[in-house]
């Protein structure tokens, strides 16, 4: 079993940057594909970015391509989401999740473990 805890959310002005972190418990972090998802008020949760076990493969939602970067450090059991050029429409609760295998594009149904989420608010 994997436990996930996100951090790094907050309030930022449009055009600013934030880096989210997701720390995972357990010794098998490197055997899980990881993903970041988000849910805005009144909307369904959706994929932001996914990353394979070693970090060699990544996938991004069209809305964040060129602005967000997902990465992972398997020595620290942590996955990151660097968010640049933030827009008000990026406002959401951001969740990290772990899946036993990687798909491209990532399939939310394969993610078995979820964090509690961290709020990101972008003001205009």
Image (tube, grey):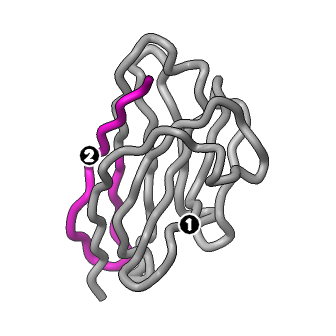
> Measuring 58% from the left and 61% from the top, which residue is drawn there?
47
**Front position in the image: 7 or 16:** 7
> Measuring 47% from the left and 81% from the top, which residue is drawn there?
43
Which residue is identified by label 1? 46
> Measuring 65% from the left and 23% from the top, which residue is drawn there?
54
Image x and y of residue 19, in percent:
35, 50
Count of numbered labels shown in the rendering: 2
Density class for disc 1 (Cα within 10 Å; few <14, some 14-19, many ≥20) is some
- Using the rendered view, name the quadrant where residue 77 is placed: top left
- Using the rendered view, name the quadrant where residue 86 is placed: bottom left
Image x and y of residue 51, in percent:
63, 39
Q: Disc 2 on helix, strand or loop?
A: strand
Q: Which region shows up in magenta? A: 1-20
Q: Please give the label number shown on residue 103.
A: none
Sequence-wise first label, 2 or 1? 2
Q: Is residue 51 shown above or below 105? A: above
Q: Horizontally, is 109 left or right of 44 in the view? A: right
Q: Disc 1 on helix, strand or loop?
A: strand
> Measuring 27% from the left and 77% from the top, which residue is drawn there?
13
The answer for how far apart the CA atoms under marks 2 and 1 are is 19 Å
| Residue at far right of view | 104
| Residue at far top of view | 27
Image x and y of residue 122, in percent:
30, 76
Q: Is residue 16 shown above or below 114? A: below
Magenta segment includes 9: yes
Question: Which quadrant holds the C terminus?
Answer: bottom left
Q: Horizontally, is 124 left or right of 34 in the view? A: left
Q: Do the residues labelled 2 and 1 touch (CB within 8 Å)?
A: no
Image x and y of residue 71, in percent:
53, 38
């Amino acid at each position: 079993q994997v436990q996930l805890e996100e951090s790094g959310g907050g309030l930022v002005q449009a055009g600013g940057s934030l880096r989210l972190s997701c720390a995972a418990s357990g010794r098998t972090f490197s055997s899980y594909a990881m993903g970041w998802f988000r849910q805005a008020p009144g909307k369904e949760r959706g994929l932001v970015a996914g990353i394979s076990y070693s970090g060699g493969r990544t996938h991004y939602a069209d809305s964040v391509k060129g602005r967000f970067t997902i990465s992972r450090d398997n020595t620290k059991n942590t996955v990151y989401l660097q968010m640049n050029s933030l827009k008000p429409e990026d406002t959401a609760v951001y969740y990290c999740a772990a899946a036993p295998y990687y798909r491209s594009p990532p399939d939310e149904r394969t993610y078995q473990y979820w964090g509690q989420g961290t709020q990101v608010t972008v003001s205009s």
